[in-house]
Image (cartoon, rainbow, N blue to C red):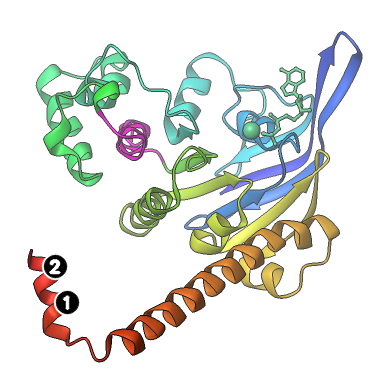
């Protein structure tokens, strides 16, 4: 379980102090796929960086597995980071390393024996469905494949938690779906608790059982995804939900147009038999 208690983060900027997080209270329970949604600049990335202590909170507390880790340093900080995997929007792979060498990088740092790392690396590539791409460099992989490699690398240390900061935001809709399926299977089969940070309500709707809405550095609404979808309380939530409704309406309209033109086409041609269609596919 990850708990944030009255957490604040203030950046010192040339224009003066800037509060990027204000009084954040959040519990991420074991086994959940917990979403955090908000528009650009809301404070989402600051929030994840405070969870793995890439940023130190200005005040408040961070508890991981009931232990206050807010001031962890040195060895205990490394231990904490090993428990928490990270995935980013831009994949952040090493361009000069093969897919396999990217995945085994955390094991190399740990000085695991070469043979053992190689074996574990291949297992992880297998898990994300890319064992056949082990020797490819990132530039020789699609965006979705690169994100799979990044996910495999994030799992190398067998973390209990996986934090995904806009992990699907650089991907098209079908690739997004396949990455979300992978996250779901990692959650289900490896028991990894996942935090999904996104600006897309569709992502929340697809994989998250709980969600918190962040706006202007504060959490303004939270609960089970179903309850937030059914009864959004805040204007910002309704606006974010509007994306999903608009997309669903556009899809329904496109399907209706396609259906209408198909039936119009059929009427014009007389009855086109199913066999002629099959022949077309074979041709
Ligand atoms: N290192 C920093 N120094 C100063 N301001 C920052 C820093 N990092 C982020 N911010 C500001 O904090 C706010 C929240 O940023 P961020 O957490 O990246 O938002 P999000 O990920 O939701 O888009 C933004 O206004 C951003 O400009
Ligand atoms: Mg961000």
- Image quadrant for the C terminus? bottom left
Q: How far across and how far down the image is residue 93, in percent?
A: 37, 22
- The residue shown at (53%, 68%) is 251
Q: Residues within 10 Å of mark 2 (few under 14, many from 20)?
A: few
Task: Classify residue 39 by image quadrant.
Answer: top right
- The residue shown at (28%, 11%) is 96
Q: How far across and how far down the image is residue 55, in percent?
A: 66, 22
Q: Is 122 positioned to the left or the right of 86 in the image? A: left
Q: Is 152 positioned to the left or the right of 212 in the image? A: left
273 in relation to 282, above or below: below
Task: Classify residue 212 by image quadrant.
Answer: bottom right
Front-most of 52 and 43?
43
Q: Quadrant of ligand 1?
A: top right
The answer to whether residue 157 is magenta is yes
CA distance for labels 1 and 2: 7 Å
Q: Badges 1 and 2: C-beta atoms under 8 Å apart?
A: yes
- The residue shown at (75%, 42%) is 5
**Residue at image mark 1:** 277
**Residue at image mark 2:** 281
The answer to whether residue 246 is magenta is no
Query: Mark 2: which secondary structure?
Result: helix
* Mark drawn on residue 71: none
Q: How far across and how far down the image is residue 117, in percent?
A: 18, 25
142 in relation to 172, above or below: above
Q: Is 273 positioned to the left or the right of 211 in the image? A: left
Q: Residues within 10 Å of mark 1 (few under 14, many from 20)?
A: few
Please name the predominant secondary structure of the magenta segment in the image. helix
Query: Mark 1: which secondary structure?
Result: helix
Range of residues picked out in magenta = 141-159
Q: Is 16 positioned to the left or the right of 211 in the image? A: right
Q: Residue furthest right?
A: 16
Q: How far across and how far down the image is residue 219, in percent?
A: 78, 49
């Amino acid at each position: 379980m990850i708990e944030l208690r009255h957490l604040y983060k203030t950046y010192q900027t040339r224009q003066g102090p800037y509060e990027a997080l204000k009084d954040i209270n959040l519990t991420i329970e074991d086994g959940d796929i917990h979403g955090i949604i908000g528009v650009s600049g809301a404070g989402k990335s600051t929030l994840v960086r405070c969870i793995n202590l890439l940023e130190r909170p200005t005040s408040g507390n961070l508890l991981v597995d009931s232990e206050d880790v807010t001031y962890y340093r040195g060895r205990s900080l490394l231990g904490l980071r090993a428990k928490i995997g990270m995935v980013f929007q831009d994949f952040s792979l090493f361009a000069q390393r093969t897919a396999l060498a990217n995945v085994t990088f955390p094991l190399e740092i740990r000085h695991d024996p070469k043979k053992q790392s190689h074996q574990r690396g291949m297992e992880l590539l297998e898990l994300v469905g890319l064992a056949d791409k082990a020797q490819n460099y990132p530039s020789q992989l699609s965006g979705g494949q690169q994100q799979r490699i990044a996910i495999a690398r994030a799992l190398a240390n067998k973390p209990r938690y996986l934090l995904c900061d806009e992990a699907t935001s650089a991907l098209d809709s079908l690739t997004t779906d396949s990455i979300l399926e992978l996250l779901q299977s990692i959650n289900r089969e490896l028991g990894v608790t996942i935090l999904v940070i996104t600006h897309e309500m569709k992502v929340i709707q697809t994989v998250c059982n709980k969600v918190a809405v962040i706006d202007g550095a504060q959490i303004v609404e939270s609960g089970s995804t179903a309850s937030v979808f059914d009864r959004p309380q805040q204007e910002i939530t309704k606006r974010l939900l509007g994306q999903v409704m608009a997309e669903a309406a556009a899809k329904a309209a496109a399907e209706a147009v396609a259906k209408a033109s198909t039936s119009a086409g059929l009427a014009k041609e007389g009855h086109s038999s199913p066999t002629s269609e099959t022949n077309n596919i074979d041709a």
